[in-house]
Amino acid sequence: MKLKATKTAIKQGFNIILSIGYCDIQYLTKYKNPFAYSCGSDGWHCDYYEIDDVCLSSGYSPIGKKVDYELMRKYELKAQKIVYDYNLEYKIRVKKVNKLLLEFINKCK
């Protein structure tokens, strides 16, 4: 279950917030659930994922430090290959994608 949060509350709660566009990291976050979301009068703005004391803000109107698109794309394509590699057991795919997500976050810091 996601909690509704204000962007201000998220900014106050995290030292590092990474801003990512809608569906730009759908494979990297496939096995993670957002803990919160923000919305406004025009509807949903973004989801928030807490990973290793970093907040990923992903959506139409994310907040935080912009992530280099080429770096993000590189990691997203790697994650996509893992997600669709059905020769691997499900648990192995989850571990590999989550490890890749941590590596991506460390590169972005």
Image (cartoon, helix red, strand yellow):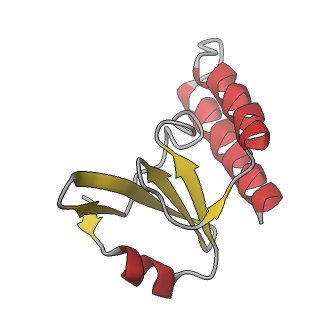
Q: Position of residue 107 (x, y in %)?
A: 82, 56
Q: Position of residue 22 (x, y in %)?
A: 46, 41
Q: Is residue 107 left or right of residue 75?
A: right
Q: Residue furthest front?
A: 42
Q: Position of residue 80 (x, y in %)?
A: 63, 24
Vertically, is 14 above or below 54?
A: below
Quadrant in the picture for residue 36: bottom left
Who's the residue at 77% across and 58% down the image? Answer: 108
Front position in the image: 47 or 31: 47
Who's the residue at 71% across and 47% down the image? Answer: 99
Q: Looking at the figure, which quarter contains the C terminus?
A: bottom right
Vertically, is 43 above or below 22?
A: below
Q: Is residue 28 left or right of residue 4?
A: right
Counting the numbered discs, the total is 0
Q: Residue furthest top?
A: 87
Front position in the image: 85 or 17: 17
Who's the residue at 78% across and 51% down the image? Answer: 103
Vertically, is 81 above or below 28?
A: above
Front position in the image: 60 or 37: 60
Q: Looking at the figure, which quarter contains the N terminus?
A: bottom left
Q: Is residue 3 left or right of residue 57?
A: left
Who's the residue at 56% across and 33% down the image? Answer: 27
Vertically, is 94 above or below 60?
A: above
Q: Residue furthest right?
A: 107
Quadrant in the picture for residue 84: top right
Q: Residue furthest left?
A: 41
